Structures are given as structure tokens and as C-alpha cells.
Image (tube, rainbow, N blue to C red):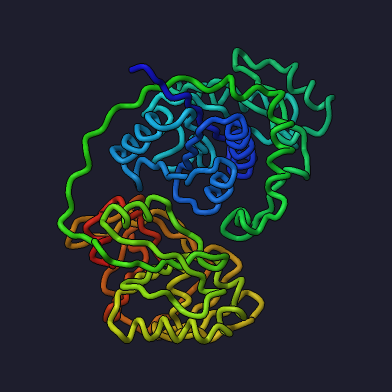
């Protein structure tokens, strides 16, 4: 073929190494140079993609050999291959963490990898860690290691002059508060909450330019995929209202694509700022941070009333995680502040200081299995018997409950719609 995508995967030795910041700055630089960039995020994540979408100017898509599936990963990479100039992928956790891991995906598609290591508390040991990353699995195409959070030129020299035993050292990026992105429980702050995000990306470009990361991209040819099959159900002419604001923003771009592929018309609205839901057939309340907006959610009585009326009209509602909490009687944050909410679901939720549930989820349905994940800090007491219970596939134990009340389906699970499109159509 005449065109070959230039691809690169940015990973690290662990979480909190600076992967998202460096990936975002690189994507922003390519965009400023006039290139079309498709950024992918490995694993189930909603917050990093917001930063990466802001930087690249394109919706970020998930890659995950288990949740997304190998065949869907092939399709997504091929679509980027034929339409974009660069494919940039951010890994999850450390390079070899998880089943499947970032390394598994990189090996499956022969994608070159940069490994970022936070060097703030080490010197010569950096080279030993780099050597371990390269030699742990000789199938990995690790084209170099990058030192992040360098304290000084002397610090950089100590690392640079170490014996890397053939591992390519790409240089270092000094500690700089101008590019740091704040985080909270669940991950990084949302892109819309960072008023100086452009300034951070501009500052980051200056820091990464000297490392010549663009030279690490390689031409990778991805396989052409067969056309997607037809589906037994359709959402043609259905108007689906999707909550999207600072309280409800945990949305996979592919989930929106699936609904549109089924023929639905998507209408976004704000639970925080709008007075009522739009004129719609079905309602989608995704996860997010309702616990950070208790007062606004409680005081928007007209919005609550419109959602209750939608429910009483026997119209479809699908609610995930934070969206489910909003439909309960009350939600209490870690400081004891509580808000009365829609009360469609009989029960209460209380935020915890530690993670309550984390991991992949798989649910058996009459349409086959659907995959997703769970990640939340709240505990809930729901006075309903669940319709079904998902499983933790890597642990073979029960996971999150799925509740069904009339036209409402609610769960802590964040489902990946492309893993069972017919089941998703039934939800809406």
C-alpha cells in the first residue's frame, strides 16, 4: 500500500510516570504542525482521553485486547491507518501490568514503544530499570527510555552516563510545575476543569522537543478488516439524550459511535445547567463526579422532575455508576454532605475514601456476553433484587449487580457497547 501509518506507543514503568502529559504534548505538537493525529488509550479510562482529545483535536478511542477485543482493535487501528498521519497510543499502568497488558497489545501489533520512568528519586538505578523493561520480554519493540522529572543538569548527567547496556536513552524532561496536571480520586482532573491546559501543552512542547520523540514513530501497516455485520435490532429514528457535563462525563467515544451506527440521533444536555431533559425517546446517564456537585444537582428540581416524568412515561433509561447514583434517594460525600436526588431507585449511596470496586466486568445476556469495567469509591444500599450479576473475569467471582425497574436499567458497570451491540440496542 502507498501509505503507512506512523505509530508510537508511550508507556511507563508504573502509573503516575507522566504518560498522559507527555502523550498530550506530543499530540498537540503534531496537531500544530498540521498533521492529523489519532490518539488511543489502552484500557478502561475516561479522564486521560479528555486531556488527549483536547490536545489532538480528535475523539480518543480505547484499545484493550480483552474489553475491546482483538478484532475490534484491528478495525480501529486500520481506520486510523487509512485516515490519519500519526497513530499515538498511551499505555495503562506499567508496561507489563495487567492481563492483558500494554506490552501484550504492543507485541500483538508490533508497535514501537517508549518507556517513561520517573527519575525524581534515582540516578544510576534508572539504567537498571530500563534494562529490565527491555529484557523482560524480547518480543517487545522498545525503541527507547525517557527520564521524567529531572531535578537538574547534574541529575541528568548522572543518568546519561550510566551503563544502559545497549538500551537507547532518549534524554530527560525536567520537573516543571507549568506542565503538571492535577488529579483527584478516579484520576486526572477533567479537561474542562483545567483553564490553562493550552499553556501547559505549549510549555510541554518546549520540554519534549529536545528529546526528538517524533523520530521514534515507525511506519506500521495495519490489516484491512471485514465489514461489520448487520444487527438484529435498530435504533433508527430514536432520539437518545445523553447527559454530558462536569458531573456526568465518563463516556467512551466508541459508545456514542455504536448508538449512531444503530441509527439513533444523539442529543447532549447538562443535568447541572439545563432545566429539563430534551424531547427524547431514551435517556443515557453515564458515570462521572456527581459527588462533587451535590448542591447543584439537588437544587435543580425541574431537571429531576423531567427525568421522573420520563421514567413514569415508561421511556427507556440506562444509567451507569454516577448516573445510577443520581437516580437514588440520596448521595453523601466523604465530608458528610448529603443531597436528596430523584429517588427513582430505592436506596442510598455514600462516598468512601478508598476504592470500593475496581476491575473488568463481564455480563451474560440473552444476546451473548457484554464486557466493561467497574471503578468507584461509593457504597450503595439498594432495596432491589438484581436482575443479574456481572463477573470479574480474571477472578471468577461475582461483580456488579444490574438492576431493572420497569423501563430503567442501572448498574455500577461501565459497559463497552461494541462488545455486544444487540444487547445495547435493547437498553435504549
Please, is residue 190 above or below residue 64 in the view? below
Q: State left or right for residue 345 relative to residue 420.
A: right
Residue 290: quadrant of the picture:
bottom right
Q: Residue at x 45, y 50 (%)?
A: 44
Q: Residue at x 64, y 33 (%)?
A: 117
Q: Residue at x 64, y 81 (%)?
A: 336
Residue 121: x and y in percent read 75, 36
Residue reaching furthest to the top: 166
Residue 404: x and y in percent read 29, 76
Please, is residue 348 above or below residue 73 in the view? below
Quadrant containing the N terminus is top left
Residue 321: x and y in percent read 44, 67
Q: Residue at x 37, y 66 (%)?
A: 400
Please, is residue 118 above or below residue 251 in the view? above
Q: State left or right for residue 331 relative to residue 196.
A: left
Q: Does residue 267 appear in the picture of this structure?
A: yes
Instruction: Compare residues 24 and 198 and report the one nearer the observer.
Output: 198
Quadrant containing the C terminus is bottom left
Q: State left or right for residue 90 relative to residue 424.
A: right
Instruction: Compare residues 371 and 385 and report the one nearer the observer.
Output: 371
Residue 324: quadrant of the picture:
bottom left
Residue 157: quadrant of the picture:
top right
Amino acid at each position: 500500500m502507498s501509505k503507512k501509518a506512523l505509530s508510537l506507543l508511550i508507556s511507563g514503568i508504573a502509573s503516575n510516570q507522566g504518560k498522559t502529559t507527555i502523550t498530550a504534548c506530543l499530540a498537540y505538537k503534531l496537531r500544530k504542525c498540521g498533521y492529523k493525529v489519532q490518539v488511543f488509550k489502552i484500557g478502561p479510562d475516561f479522564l486521560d482521553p479528555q486531556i488527549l482529545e483536547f490536545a489532538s483535536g480528535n475523539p480518543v478511542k480505547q484499545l484493550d485486547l480483552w474489553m475491546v477485543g482483538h478484532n475490534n482493535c484491528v478495525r480501529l487501528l486500520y481506520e486510523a491507518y487509512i485516515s490519519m498521519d500519526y497513530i499515538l497510543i498511551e499505555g495503562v499502568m506499567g508496561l507489563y501490568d495487567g492481563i492483558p497488558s500494554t506490552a501484550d497489545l504492543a507485541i500483538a501489533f508490533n508497535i514501537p514503544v517508549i518507556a517513561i520512568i520517573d527519575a525524581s528519586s534515582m540516578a544510576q538505578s534508572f539504567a537498571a530499570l530500563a534494562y529490565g523493561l527491555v529484557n523482560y520480554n524480547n518480543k517487545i519493540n522498545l525503541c527507547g527510555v525517557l527520564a521524567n522529572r529531572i531535578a537538574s543538569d547534574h541529575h541528568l548527567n548522572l543518568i546519561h552516563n550510566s551503563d544502559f547496556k545497549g538500551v537507547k536513552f532518549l534524554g530527560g524532561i525536567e520537573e516543571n510545575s507549568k506542565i503538571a496536571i492535577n488529579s483527584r480520586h478516579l484520576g486526572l482532573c477533567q479537561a474542562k476543569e483545567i483553564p490553562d491546559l493550552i499553556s501547559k501543552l505549549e510549555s510541554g512542547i518546549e520540554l519534549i522537543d529536545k528529546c526528538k520523540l517524533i523520530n521514534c514513530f515507525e511506519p506500521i501497516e495495519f490489516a484491512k478488516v471485514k465489514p461489520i455485520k448487520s444487527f438484529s435490532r435498530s435504533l433508527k429514528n430514536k432520539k437518545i439524550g445523553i447527559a454530558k457535563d462536569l458531573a456526568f462525563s465518563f463516556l467512551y467515544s466508541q459508545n456514542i459511535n455504536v448508538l449512531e451506527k444503530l441509527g439513533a440521533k444523539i442529543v447532549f444536555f447538562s443535568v447541572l445547567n439545563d432545566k429539563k431533559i430534551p424531547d427524547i425517546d431514551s435517556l443515557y446517564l453515564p458515570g462521572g463526579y456527581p459527588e462533587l456537585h451535590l448542591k447543584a444537582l439537588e437544587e435543580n428540581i425541574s431537571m429531576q422532575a423531567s427525568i421522573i416524568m420520563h421514567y413514569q412515561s415508561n421511556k427507556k433509561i440506562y444509567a451507569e455508576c454516577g448516573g445510577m447514583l443520581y437516580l437514588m434517594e440520596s448521595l453523601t460525600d466523604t465530608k458528610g454532605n448529603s443531597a436528596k436526588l430523584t429517588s427513582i431507585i430505592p436506596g442510598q449511596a455514600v462516598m468512601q475514601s478508598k476504592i470500593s470496586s475496581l476491575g473488568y466486568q463481564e455480563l451474560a445476556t440473552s444476546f451473548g456476553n457484554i464486557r466493561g469495567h467497574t471503578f468507584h469509591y461509593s457504597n450503595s444500599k439498594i432495596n432491589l433484587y438484581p436482575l443479574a450479576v456481572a463477573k470479574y473475569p480474571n477472578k471468577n467471582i461475582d461483580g456488579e449487580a444490574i438492576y431493572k425497574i420497569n423501563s430503567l436499567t442501572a448498574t455500577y458497570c461501565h459497559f463497552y457497547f461494541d462488545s455486544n451491540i444487540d444487547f445495547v440496542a435493547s437498553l435504549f
